[in-house]
């Protein structure tokens, strides 16, 4: 099976303003977030992977090929004029061939049984199978999980030019054409990351999963507190996990890091600073005495002394897909 990883981000809140850095490249806690999806697909036996990023493809390709564990066998779809999720699938039609393929979000944590989803897809003869998960606040309701199994012939319904969304435009066309769209309840984990709040929660979980298994060149100082051997952390600093401090970072005297907190490579945290639910990316700087809550600080970003800085949390719009799922599934669906 082949897979297309949708790493676009033409969505409010998907980039740090002024940086152009797509959420797919945000640290998780050190490798780009998109690599967790790539690793999931490889684990599930996906043979070939393409990435489409709506104008950010070259940036993502550069980072994935230059990392400590370079991804060198990825096919990249150039998309200088954003075509949208369905549009980029249409543009990949020749590469995809005639086999069922999976389209999946790049900004998520997945650990579910893809084979079970594929088996149901084949058994039902569906044109598209929509992966869904139980709502966190109501197990009897389903919500879309950003993963789809697709028959390539359906891509003929996508126009050859212009922006085409998957949920709002492509799925309605498939249904209107009389093709069967199936809802599959995923067996396992599927956590979408479409806002700063969701990202910080996911980073927390990612760090805690490492407890007791520190990677090479890191020391686990206490449960869920990982410090790179080249980082400098003052003895008087207070670290309450989950905390991740990367190579060459500096944490000053009496600084308080109340997790989840990530201090990226080369980042500086000044004396007496207070950080909570914060990711300070590489080479960023947080001034002495600063209070930073629920914030994602861009690479080379600076935060000086002042009132607590808060990020704007952007809600997830489920729109027409959730309404479709409510019709397609016997379970109730949140929207």
Image (cartoon, rainbow, N blue to C red):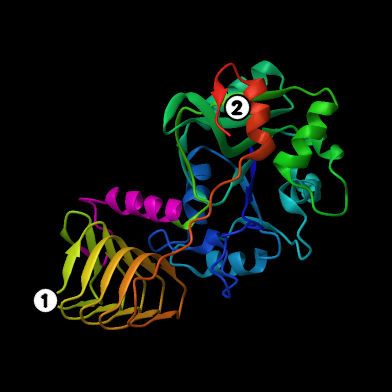
Please name the residue that numbered disc 2 is placed on: 118
Q: In terms of depth relative to the viewer, which is nearer, 255 or 115?
A: 255
Q: Where residue 257 appears, x then y in whole percent?
A: 24, 67
The image quarter in which residue 219 lies: bottom left
| Marker count (numbered) | 2
Q: How far, Cα to Cα, is label 1 from label 2?
A: 53 Å
Front in this rendered view, residue 95 or 109: 109
> Looking at the image, is mark 1 or mark 2 nearer the viewer?
1
Residue 129 can be seen in this image: no
Q: Please determine whether, in this image, residue 151 is positioned above or below residue 316.
A: above
Residue 108 in sight: yes
Q: Quick one: quadrant of the N terminus?
A: top right
Can residue 183 be found in the magenta stretch? no
Query: Measuring 25% from the left and 80% from the top, which residue is drawn there?
Result: 289
Q: Which mark is residue 235?
A: 1
What crowding class fits label 2: few (fewer than 14 Cα within 10 Å), some (14-19), or many (20 or more)?
some
* Range of magenta residues: 197-219
Q: Nearer the viewer, residue 195 or 282?
A: 195
The first of marks 1 and 2 along the sequence is 2
| Residue projecting furthest to the left | 235
Residue shown at the point (80%, 53%) measured from the top left: 163
215 relative to 284, above or below: above
Q: Is residue 320 left or right of residue 94?
A: left
Residue at (63% x, 43% y) in the render? 3
**Quadrant into which the C terminus falls:** top right
Residue 205 in the image: x percent, y percent? 33, 49
């Amino acid at each position: 099976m082949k897979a297309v990883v949708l790493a676009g981000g033409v969505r409010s809140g998907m980039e740090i303003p002024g940086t152009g850095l797509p959420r797919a490249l945000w640290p998780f806690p050190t490798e780009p977030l998109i690599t967790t999806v790539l690793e999931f697909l490889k684990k599930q036996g996906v043979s070939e992977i393409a990435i489409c990023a709506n104008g950010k493809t070259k940036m993502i390709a550069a980072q994935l090929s230059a990392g400590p564990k370079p991804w060198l066998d990825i096919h990249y779809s150039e998309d200088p004029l954003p075509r949208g999720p369905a549009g980029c699938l249409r543009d990949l039609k020749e590469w995809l061939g005639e086999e069922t393929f999976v389209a999946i979000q790049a900004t998520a944590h997945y650990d579910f049984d893809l084979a079970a989803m594929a088996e149901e897809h084949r058994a039902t003869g569906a044109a598209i199978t929509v992966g869904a998960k139980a709502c966190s606040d109501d197990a009897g309701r389903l919500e879309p999980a950003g993963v789809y199994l697709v028959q390539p012939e359906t891509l003929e319904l996508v126009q050859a030019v212009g922006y085409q969304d998957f949920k709002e435009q492509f799925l309605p066309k498939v249904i209107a054409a009389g093709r069967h769209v199936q809802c599959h309840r995923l067996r396992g984990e599927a956590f979408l990351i479409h806002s700063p709040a969701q990202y910080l929660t996911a980073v927390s979980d990612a760090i805690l999963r490492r407890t007791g298994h520190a990677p090479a060149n890191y020391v686990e100082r206490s449960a869920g507190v990982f410090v790179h051997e080249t980082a400098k952390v003052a003895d008087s600093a207070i670290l309450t996990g989950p905390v991740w401090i990367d190579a060459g970072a500096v944490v000053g005297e009496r600084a308080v890091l109340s997790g989840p907190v990530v201090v990226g490579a080369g980042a500086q945290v000044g004396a007496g600073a207070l950080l909570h639910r914060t990711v300070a990316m590489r080479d960023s700087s947080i001034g002495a005495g600063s209070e930073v809550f629920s914030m994602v600080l861009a690479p080379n970003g600076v935060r000086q002394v002042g009132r607590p800085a808060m990020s704007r949390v952007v809600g997830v719009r489920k729109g027409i897909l959730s309404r479709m799922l409510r019709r397609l599934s016997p379970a109730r669906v949140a929207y």
